[in-house]
């Protein structure tokens, strides 16, 4: 079974051909790691899944991505609903300069949840799911910017969960965090697979090995290797992948 | 050995350069500070004897001891209030359009370039434009409204430029975060960009209004040098403003009127300081809330 079916995906930024003929089927309720050296198109790839590349002037995308049998690049796709269903967590924690509560409530409010009672329920549920509730439940009105980096990133995860997505994209979510905070996020990722499909960009090989069920290796905009994590790491089919994993280049 | 000495020499030169630059900056700030203090001292010594309740509550008169600034004071308040109401939404709207909505093409860059140019146009040109457009073509007469609209044109470029700076200073990560949650462009603008940019916008707007309240040339073109012996009650009344009144007094032959002018300057400065304090107060409050 495939959750996200990518077919012949190409992305250009101006004249730069960033992603080249990507064909891949990503599995549901699993963590898929996208790894590869800097500038290989990892971030562009996951931003193609929620069509966030479109915010960049001069970007162009061809090909199809099917989620639940619907091509998200079809004309009739509601891009705002797509982004609700495909949540995203960024490399640097980016909570809004508002209270913790307002951060989590931002998405639901955006999509029309008005009643305070419902918002309270959603905020609590999302914070619990992101394993942050116990740390912040008595200071929901405090500014989100007062939280530590790791807490901010879990808040961003809660914010993404609050609009009830079924896919979560994470763009190097731990690269700005210390090892303890990283461990918490990684444990959270594993737990999230119970309900969600998680796609994570990383250039930390150990992280991919620790948390990912499946791993894709991108190099210079091409998908070089894709398979379950163990076979990619232990028995890569491509020499490129092997060289990358053994640290011959990075 | 050689290299070491060379290194030390370079170090000394660098240090001297640093001290020189520091002195230069200090001289710069001193020149502006000292001239401001001299100006204030001069205005205060001349004006203080004239500044009393009678001065604030009287209309202009041929007799210095009966003359006051009431009409001009209310004229200025009327004009600045109207300018604020008209120019802030227009300026912020234009800035939001240019930063968040406009496609990046030659037309947008052409508009942006010309806004910057408009900010540099001499104010008397706006005065003449206002005279032709608002006073005559639109038949508003020499009214407060005509004056306010002219002033709006004058400070709009400044407000737009300041607002665009404020909008640009909102981190892109906030926008990306909001878009990624499925927010529309308007939702991102209203709920993320605008609250973040508002303090900067307000600061820019109030500084622009401070400029408007002190402008003389375009106001002379619109309101003309006349004696107004009443307090305006509506936007279509005739009016005068404080800089015109001050200008008027300075031009009169009797020495006493120079004292009146100085007193007028003190009132004008007090209003300017008041407005700037309000700007700072609003900005601090918003910034605290944002944090």
Image: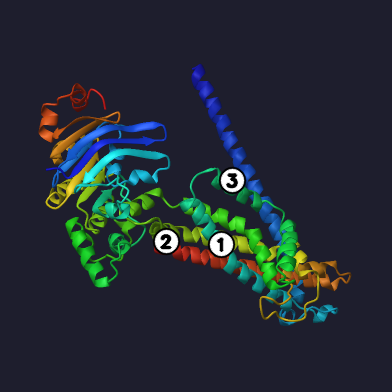
Most extreme residue toward the right, as rendered?
A: B253
Q: Is residue A48 left or right of residue B7?
A: left
Q: Residue at x 22, y 26 (%)?
A: A244
User: For numbered disc 1, what is the local secondary structure?
Assistant: helix
Q: Are marks 3 and 1 in contact (CB under 8 Å)?
A: no
Residue bearing the label numbered 2:
B190
Q: CA distance from mark 3 to mark 2?
A: 26 Å
Relative to B96, B157 lies left or right: right
Q: Quadrant of the C terminus of chain B?
A: bottom left
Do the residues marked 3 and 2 share a common chain?
yes
* Neighbours of disc 1 within 10 Å: few (<14), some (14-19), many (20+): some
Q: How is the image coloured?
A: rainbow
Q: Quadrant of residue A224?
A: top left
Q: Estimate how packed mark 2 is, as few (under 14), some (14 to 19) or many (20 or more) residues with alpha carbons within 10 Å.
A: few
Protein chain holding label 1: B
On residue B90, the disc is 1
Residue at position x 71%, y 73% in the image: B143
Left or right, A246 with respect to A57, comes to left
Which of disc 2 and disc 1 is earlier in sequence?
1
- Name the residue nearer the viewer: A222 or B22: A222
The secondary structure type at the circle numbered 3 is helix
Q: Which mark is residue B110?
A: 3
Circle 2 SS class: helix
Identify the residue at horizontal 48%, vertical 61% (top origin): B198
**Residue B224 seen from this side:** yes
Q: Earlier in the sequence, mark 3 or mark 2?
A: 3
Residue A15 versus residue B71 in the image, above or below: above
Q: Nearer the viewer, residue A56 or A247?
A: A56
């Amino acid at each position: 079974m495939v959750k996200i079916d990518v077919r012949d995906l190409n992305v250009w930024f101006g004249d730069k051909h960033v992603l080249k003929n990507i064909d891949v089927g990503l599995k549901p309720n699993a963590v898929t790691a996208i790894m590869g050296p800097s500038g290989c198109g990892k971030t562009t790839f996951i931003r193609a899944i929620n069509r966030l590349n479109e915010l960049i002037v001069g970007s162009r995308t061809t090909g199809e991505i099917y989620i639940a049998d619907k091509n998200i690049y079809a004309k009739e796709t509601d891009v705002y609903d797509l982004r609700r269903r495909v949540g995203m967590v960024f490399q640097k924690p980016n909570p809004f300069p508002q209270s913790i509560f307002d951060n989590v409530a931002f998405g639901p409010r955006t999509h029309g949840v008005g009643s305070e009672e419902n918002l309270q329920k959603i905020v609590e549920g999302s914070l619990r799911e992101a394993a942050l509730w116990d740390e912040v439940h008595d200071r929901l009105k405090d500014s989100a910017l007062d939280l530590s980096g790791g807490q901010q990133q879990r808040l961003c995860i809660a914010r993404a969960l609050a609009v009830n997505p079924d896919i979560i994209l994470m763009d190097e979510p731990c690269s700005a965090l210390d090892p303890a905070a990283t461990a918490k996020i990684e444990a959270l990722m594993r737990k999230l697979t119970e309900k969600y499909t998680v796609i994570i960009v990383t250039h930390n090989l150990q992280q991919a090995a620790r948390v990912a069920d499946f791993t894709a290796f991108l190099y210079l905009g091409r998908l070089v290797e894709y398979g379950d994590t163990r076979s990619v790491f232990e028995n890569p089919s491509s020499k490129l992948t092997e060289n990358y994993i053994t640290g011959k280049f990075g | 050995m050689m290299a070491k000495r060379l290194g030390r020499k370079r170090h000394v030169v660098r240090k001297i350069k640093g001290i020189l630059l520091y002195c230069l900056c200090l001289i710069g700030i001193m020149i502006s500070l000292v001239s401001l203090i001299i100006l204030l001292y001069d205005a205060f010594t001349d004006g203080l004897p004239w500044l009393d309740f009678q001065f604030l509550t009287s209309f202009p008169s041929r007799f210095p001891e009966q003359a006051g600034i009431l009409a001009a004071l209310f004229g200025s308040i009327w004009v600045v209030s109207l300018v604020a109401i008209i120019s802030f939404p227009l300026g912020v709207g234009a800035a939001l359009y240019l930063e968040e909505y406009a496609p990046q093409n030659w037309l947008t860059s052409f508009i942006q370039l010309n806004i910057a140019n408009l900010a540099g146009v001499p104010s008397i040109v706006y005065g003449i434009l206002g005279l032709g457009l608002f006073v005559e073509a639109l038949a508003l007469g020499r009214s407060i409204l005509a004056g306010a609209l002219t002033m709006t044109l004058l400070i709009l470029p400044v407000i737009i430029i300041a607002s665009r700076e404020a909008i640009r200073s909102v981190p892109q990560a906030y926008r990306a975060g909001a878009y990624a949650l499925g927010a529309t462009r308007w939702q991102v603008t209203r709920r993320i960009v605008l609250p973040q940019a508002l303090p900067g916008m307000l600061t820019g707007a109030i500084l622009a209004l401070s400029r408007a309240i002190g402008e003389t040339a375009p106001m002379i073109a619109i309101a003309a040098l006349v004696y107004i012996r009443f307090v305006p009650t509506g936007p279509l009344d005739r009016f005068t403003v404080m800089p015109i009144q001050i200008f008027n007094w300075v031009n009169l032959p009797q020495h006493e009127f120079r004292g009146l002018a100085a007193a007028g300057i003190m009132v004008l400065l007090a209003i300017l300081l008041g407005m700037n304090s309000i700007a700072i107060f609003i900005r601090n409050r918003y910034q605290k809330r944002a944090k």
